[in-house]
Amino acid sequence: MAVNNYHEEEALGKAYDARLMKRLLKYARPYRIGLISSVILLIGGSVMQLFLPVIMQIAIDDHLLKGDIEGMSRIALIYAGILIVSFVLSYLQLYMTMLIGQKVQYDIRMEIFSHLQKLHMRFFDKNPIGRLVTRVTNDVGVLDEMFSSGLVSIFGDIITLIGIVIALLYYNWKLALLTFAVLPLLVIATAIFRRKARQAFRDVRARLARLNAFMQEHINGMAVIQLFSRQNKVLEAFSSINADLRAANFRSVYYHATFFPVVEIISALSLAILLYYGSHQILLAALTFGELVAFIQLVQRFYFPIRDLAEKYNILQSSMASSERIFKLLDTKPEMAMNEESRKISRLTDAIKFDKVWFAYNGDDFVLKDVSFDVKLGEKVAIVGATGAGKTSLISLLFRFYENQKGSIQIDGVDIKSLPAGELRRRMSLVLQDVFIFSGDYAGNIRLGNEDISDEKIKEALRRVNLYDFIMKNGGGLHSEVKERGATLSTGQKQLLSFARALAYDPDILVLDEATSSVDTATERIIQKALDNLLENRTAIIIAHRLSTIEKADKIIVMHNGQVREIGKHKELMDKKGIYYRLYLMQFGHDKLKEAV
């Protein structure tokens, strides 16, 4: 099956993509009334601004030059009134668009995070977490900027620009044509800026994602960095990535810092031509002083939306790049078809069967080859083998983290591919060697959002794994704070907490993936003692390196190079003197071996 590979640094689309914009506007559809209202308010504010040069002309020609002080007072009040109305309209429009932007941002983040939780494990194997965090944070933030200050403003700037052009032509078409004579210079400058800014923005986004990925990986691995005194080397690598990001940002700033002064120069050139020609027209009585002042004000306003559109182009460009990455992520389909029909599984009457299962993480490089075995209801089955034998891969397939290419895995005679994933996993609990503890409290780390699990059930689970006294006395109680990744807990306490988490869900099948290999001998004895009672009347699969922990198993499956090589009880396998016998010999030596035999 083809795998969607997700690369941050690939060249992304064009400055405007109608297909992407159509998908983006889908998120604005629930708030279309607010968007339409914002556009109306923006047009109203723009019209108010166009009235100001007209008021200025009337004030100069009809009142100021005639010495009409009373008339000037009335004009001043009207001018102030228009400014107040324009301020109110702008405030309402800005508040409404910002509110819509935040709502859209919330909706998109929820959709992305929900989608991420449905993706297959292979996807997370191939995609750095830092890049995925960039999708949910930075890229969605860019889209918020488009919806809150880009989409409506672009429309408003275009309307304002059209209105100013009409007003200029209406006032004096000759002066208007002189003003437009410098527009080719503006078009050339804008085209150059657009091309340069587009590439600079891509560079910034790619380097920002690379920086996030580097930080996430190395902060998680800080213990290893400090242990091997690699701080300076890591700092050098970070400095190089950070310098690349800084250089990309400098290029972006440079193009902006160059473009806007160029617009100012073109604007000044336009005004100089206008003043020169307009003054002659006034001397010839073909133009009034008030008309020239009003025209100059209109020309100045003519360049405002042009500057703003150039800025909004940057927002549009960034939005297209971000949306393309976001939609590429949202379009990534899970490799496995998850049957989520409301099909319920009753208490198990039969357990698990692997029937000629083949599995490869990549291509035809199979890590499991023709694996067949069954686990009867209530059996305690151990799976052993050297590192890389395929033990953990078996468990990953059972929980449908990955999907086998050949053969079938059945529970109660039903292929697990036909079962709802949630219902399948609800019947099983997995305890891993590397325990993940969430920030929050003890109860939340055991309950994991399942409100059907009461505090009493949590306490009972804690008692069974001998962690209750520590949490209630030393830990501060069920609802006391647990730091990120369980920073204040020992390795053994984390492992015990994961046992309590699994037991609170009361699974039919309990899977232990080398769950005791990271704890000390004393803690292992505590866990082992609890397990004898906990596994009663429960099907269990136990993967263990310490063979002493599985000597009493009902069945031991020996894996070697992705194949099942031996199956039997401890004594039977020892008598065969095969792979299990050699593993036992390597682990315990001849003295212990004599006792076992």
Image (cartoon, rainbow, N blue to C red):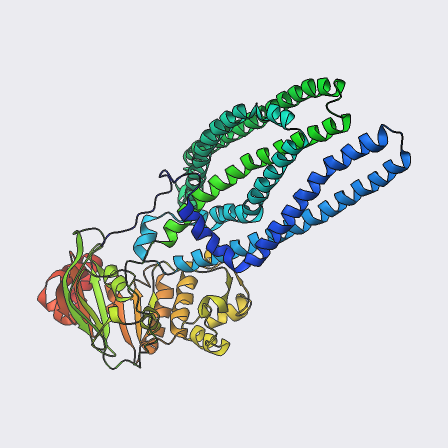
Taking 189 as reference, is 97 left or right? right
**Where 243 falls versus 363 (above or below)?**
above
Q: Residue at x 47, y 69 (%)?
A: 449
344 and 171: which is toward the camera: 171
The quadrant of the picture occupied by the C terminus is: bottom left
When asked about the image quadrant of residue 389, the answer is: bottom left
Give the percent coordinates (x, y) of residue 349.
25, 82
Q: How many marks?
A: 0
Residue 276 placement: quadrant: top right
Task: Residue at 70% x, 21% y: name it.
Answer: 278
Percent x, y of residue 545: 25, 60
Pick whichever, 372 or 193, lies toward us: 193
Q: Is residue 552 visible?
A: no
Can residue 140 be seen in the rendering of this structure? Answer: yes
Picture coordinates of residue 550, whole percent (x, y): 24, 69
595 or 428: nearer the eye? 428
Looking at the picture, tell me which residue is in the foreground, 39 or 247.
Answer: 39
Q: Is residue 345 left or right of residue 110?
A: left
Quadrant containing the N terminus is bottom left
Q: Residue furthest left?
A: 576
Where is residue 183? Give x, y as percent: 55, 26
Residue beneath the point at 43% across and 34% down = 203
Compared to residue 361, the image places residue 166 above or below, namely above
